[in-house]
């Protein structure tokens, strides 16, 4: 990955824009409302799971353009990328699989059924995002399949009672152009927000032969709104659309097994729609409808050679019932997913249409023992059209021992349904699905402690975690009969143990220092042999320094993300067997310098990968 520099070319009018240089030296105001760690909003100190919240202010301070770049600095998160900007990007949490992390975008389940249930991180930009909530640990009892290791809840910017308009434009190395507009408006009983952004780059070259650059182009648009029909009745809706394309290299299967220049393009379309009604009586009622549509196409020399698509419709009803100081949430949910694959017929037919539906009953109970002790207990029953019914559970406790010390613990059972590709996928001469797969099941535990300094200028946290996974699916098992790869449930189990340590400190009124470190031991046992799992670094971490000066009009942020040594698999040309290879550790160092020219105009310069790491 080569050095990437960018700078603001022309900052147009920004009306009533939130200052990007505001920093708080008071860490005691941590009563953030979290909406993804329970079925109803809950104060952060009352949650027994490890939580991280990324605010709009933090995104703008770092001026990161992709959410995956921000996630590199989160404890327990590991980001893998197969090439430059726009290349496949995977996020693993605490040694999990990439499709064990559930992503919600404004409440819509955003994992792509047509891409192995993974979220397409390479196409998620930060332009119109207000905040990101991250809940680590199993959350299947709340959100079902995919929420085995964590939930990442992306909340886009919405309208407000004050009209405002934002515009930015940016240019940088590799002919990168990035521009966006956004606006918010509203009155006492309604609000509306919109955003439009395009990020295009010629990219870089990763092939060993040739010098063709692999570019990327992402266009994102969104519209959200709310109508407060009365004191008791609220309507909300949202629409989000992503149109993206990225160039990729071919693979030399004859001589090297490595990337080689080729005229190949991947196109991706994502559509998210949500609409909801909330009625507040003695009981709070929620009725929601959510829709996801994805389309993926592979083109060679401008002609489409294969494609996959999916759509998912979810209807849910939830009642929040107050029981004195406690709260009981009861929910019903029905979800139907369709999957389509198209390709060239040859030594087999990849063309197919599949579907699956799930009906669920969810209970979530918040019990408060005084002001300092909170218990969360959740249970979910999933009736799946294709698999046996499954029950997921979770119990957590948060105890504010003193004003400076908080203890937390969490235990949960998670589950992950096999993907459509694992069950039915067919790629001639390469892969054939296995319709007899069983869902993966996990049990996970975590314990945490948090200390706060007497002057509220320092915060230290430590979390121990463990996860045991059964029936893990191996998507690269060789079938000696078909002479192709397939998917199968492993006979042994997988185990992930580790520790997360984080610290944050105000060294002075204008300098904030934060750091975190994660140790992860992730291994799997198969046929009595235990090996380390691929693409999981044992050591990872981050150091960030944020400094303000010139009466808080200027800001410098230095972010250094560490990715430790990890192993991966290399497939040399036939008939050579696959090989486990070692990937070296690296530091990704980014610097952002900003200056508030006026209350409406900001300038910044950003440089990524200053150490020019590969």
Image: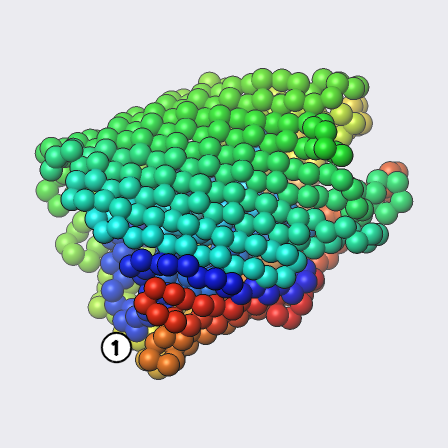
Res 198 seen here:
yes
Residue found at x 88% / y 40%: 254
Q: Quadrant of residue 384?
A: top left
Q: Is residue 84 above or below residue 269?
A: below
In this rendering, would 395 be left or right of 491? left
Quadrant of residue 315 within the rendered picture: top left
- Residue in view at x 30 percent, y 73 percent: 25
- Crowd class of label 1 (few under 14; some 14 to 19; many from 20; radius 10 Å): few
* Residue 491 seen: no
Q: How is the image coloured?
A: rainbow
Which residue is at the front of the view, 348 or 394?
348
Q: Is 105 located above or below residue 466 in the figure?
A: above
**Residue under circle 1?**
454
Where is 424 relative to 162, above or below?
above
Tell me the SS state at disc 1. loop
Foreground pick, 417 / 609? 609
């Amino acid at each position: 990955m080569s050095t990437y520099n960018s700078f603001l070319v022309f900052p147009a009018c920004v009306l009533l824009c939130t200052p990007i240089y505001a920093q708080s030296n008071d860490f005691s105001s941590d009563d953030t409302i979290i909406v993804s760690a329970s079925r109803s909003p809950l104060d952060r100190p009352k949650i027994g799971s490890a939580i991280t919240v990324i605010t709009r202010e933090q995104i703008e301070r770092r001026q990161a353009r992709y959410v995956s770049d921000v996630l590199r600095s989160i404890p327990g998160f590991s980001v893998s990328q197969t090439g430059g900007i726009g290349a496949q990007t995977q996020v693993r949490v605490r040694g999990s699989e990439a499709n064990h992390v559930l992503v919600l975008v404004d409440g819509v389940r955003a994992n792509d059924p047509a891409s192995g249930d993974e979220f397409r991180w390479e196409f998620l930009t930060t332009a119109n995002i207000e905040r990101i909530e991250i809940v680590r640990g199993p959350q299947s009892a709340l959100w079902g399949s995919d929420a085995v290791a964590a939930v990442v809840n992306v909340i886009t910017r919405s309208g407000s009672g004050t009209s405002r308009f934002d515009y930015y434009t940016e240019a940088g190395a590799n002919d990168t152009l990035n521009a966006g507009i956004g606006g918010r408006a509203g009155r006492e009983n309604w609000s509306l927000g919109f955003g439009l952004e395009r990020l295009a780059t010629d990219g870089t070259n990763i092939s060993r032969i040739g010098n063709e650059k692999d570019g990327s182009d992402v266009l994102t648009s969104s519209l959200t709104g709310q109508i407060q029909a009365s004191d008791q009745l609220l309507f909300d809706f949202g629409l989000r659309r992503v149109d993206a394309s990225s160039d990729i290299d071919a693979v030399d299967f004859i001589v090297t097994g490595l990337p080689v220049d080729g005229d190949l393009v991947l196109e991706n379309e994502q559509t998210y729609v949500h609409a909801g009604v909330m009625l507040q009586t003695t009981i709070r009622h929620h009725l929601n409808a959510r829709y996801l549509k994805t389309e993926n196409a592979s083109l060679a020399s401008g002609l489409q050679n294969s494609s996959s698509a999916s759509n998912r419709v979810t209807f849910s009803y939830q009642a929040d019932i107050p029981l004195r100081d406690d709260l009981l949430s009861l929910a019903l949910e029905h979800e139907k997913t369709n999957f389509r694959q198209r390709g060239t017929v040859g030594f087999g037919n990849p063309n197919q249409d599949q579907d699956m539906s799930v009906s669920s009953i969810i209970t979530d109970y918040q019990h408060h023992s005084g002001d300092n002790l909170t218990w969360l207990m959740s249970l979910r029953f999933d009736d799946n059209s294709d698999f046996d019914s499954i029950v997921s559970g979770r119990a957590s406790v948060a105890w504010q021992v003193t004003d400076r010390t908080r203890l937390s613990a969490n235990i949960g059972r998670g589950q992950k349904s096999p993907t459509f590709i694992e069950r039915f996928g067919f790629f001639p001469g390469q892969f054939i699905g296995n319709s007899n797969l069983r869902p993966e099941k996990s049990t996970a535990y975590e314990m945490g402690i948090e200390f706060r300094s007497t002057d509220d200028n320092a915060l230290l946290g430590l979390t121990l975690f463990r996860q045991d996974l059964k029936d893990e699916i191996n998507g690269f098992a060789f079938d000696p009969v078909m002479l192709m790869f397939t998917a199968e449930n492993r006979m042994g189990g997988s185990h992930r143990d580790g520790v997360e340590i984080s610290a944050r400190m105000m060294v002075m009124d204008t300098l904030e220092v934060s750091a975190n470190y994660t140790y992860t031991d992730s291994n799997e046992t198969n046929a009595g042999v235990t090996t380390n799992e691929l693409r999981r670094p044992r050591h990872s971490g981050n150091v960030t320094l944020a400094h303000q000066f010139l009466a808080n009009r200027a800001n410098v942020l230095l972010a250094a993300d560490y990715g430790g040594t990890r192993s991966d698999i290399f497939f040399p040309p036939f008939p050579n067997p696959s090989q486990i290879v070692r990937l070296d550790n690296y530091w990704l160092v980014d610097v952002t310098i900003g200056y508030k020219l006026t209350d409406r105009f900001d300038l910044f310069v950003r440089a990524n990968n200053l150490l020019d790491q590969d």
